[in-house]
Image: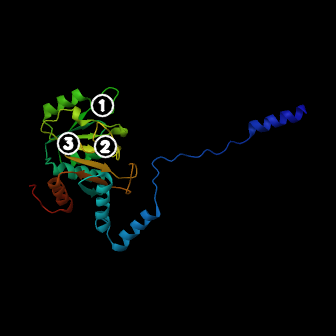
Amino acid sequence: IIKDTCWMSTETLQRPLKKQKEIEFHKPTLSREDLKGVLECLVDEHLSSGEIVERFEKSFCHTFKFKQSISTNSLTSAYHLGLLGLGVQSGDHVILSSFAPIAALDAIFLLRAKPVLVDLGKNSFHPDIESFNKKRNETQAKVAIFDHTFGSLINIAKYELGETKVIEDYSEAIGAVSEVIPVSRQSNLSICGLNAENMITTGNGAMITTSDTNLAQVIRSLKSGVSSKRT
């Protein structure tokens, strides 16, 4: 009996562990409808624009209650078009958080503008308010970029903006509701990334949203390559 007990004890200790299941990070959920949409684009030979893109833009507006939406093929393109639409030119200053998306910096450099980086505040994922206000006044930044880093909602009203125009990136806070902060509606235009690492994805791309019809018209003209003066 003692020998059997020892043998059972050894067997229990040496029993192989169950294979641990890996938890996939940022795994997209693709439905049959998504696959059907891709096939429709290929059949219609619309790889950049067309009826499906227009339907997606309208659906985005309807779902998230936006007035205007313009889709782009990347987050960098969205920032590039947004900055152009707000009149940023070579030599202009654009102020943003040191944790802002790298796509924002890429777009700033494409325009030969000058980025003004602001460190995060203590115990915060947002730009330090005092440092931001000081640097904005010193540089007279033409545009300020704010983002909801890691889903931490930022209240842009706490910052002194003066004549500085604002871009709000809500890629990590899409659909968020707050009684205090009007997420994605605190700026001249807002941007939502749609790549594989974002909360919703089209594989790649981004969406520009705004309530300013004239600004939306300018951005659409820039996207299509048609010259247009803002009225």
The residue carrying mark 1 is 120
- Residue 78, relative to residue 118: is it above or below? below
Q: Image point 29% across, 59% down: which residue?
A: 57
Q: Amino acid at mark 3?
A: Val
**Residue 101: mark:** 2
Badge 1 crowding class, 10 Å Cα cut-off, few under 14, some 14 to 19, many 20 or more, is: some
The residue carrying mark 3 is 166
Q: Earlier in the sequence, mark 2 or mark 3?
A: 2
Q: Amino acid at mark 1?
A: Leu
Q: Image point 16% across, 33% down: which residue?
A: 136
- Residue 206, relative to residue 41: is it above or below? above
Q: Element at badge 3? A: strand
Q: Earlier in the sequence, mark 3 or mark 1?
A: 1
Badge 2 crowding class, 10 Å Cα cut-off, few under 14, some 14 to 19, many 20 or more, is: some
Q: Image point 46% across, 58% down: which residue?
A: 30
- Residue 130, relative to residue 230: is it above or below? above
Q: Image point 42% across, 62% down: which residue?
A: 34
Q: CA distance from mark 3 to mark 1?
A: 18 Å
Q: Nearer the viewer, mark 2 or mark 3?
A: 3
Q: Element at badge 2? A: loop
Badge 3 crowding class, 10 Å Cα cut-off, few under 14, some 14 to 19, many 20 or more, is: many
> Farthest residue in the bottom direction?
43
Q: Position of residue 120 (x, y in %)?
A: 30, 31
Q: Nearer the viewer, mark 3 or mark 1?
A: 3
Q: CA distance from mark 2 to mark 3?
A: 15 Å
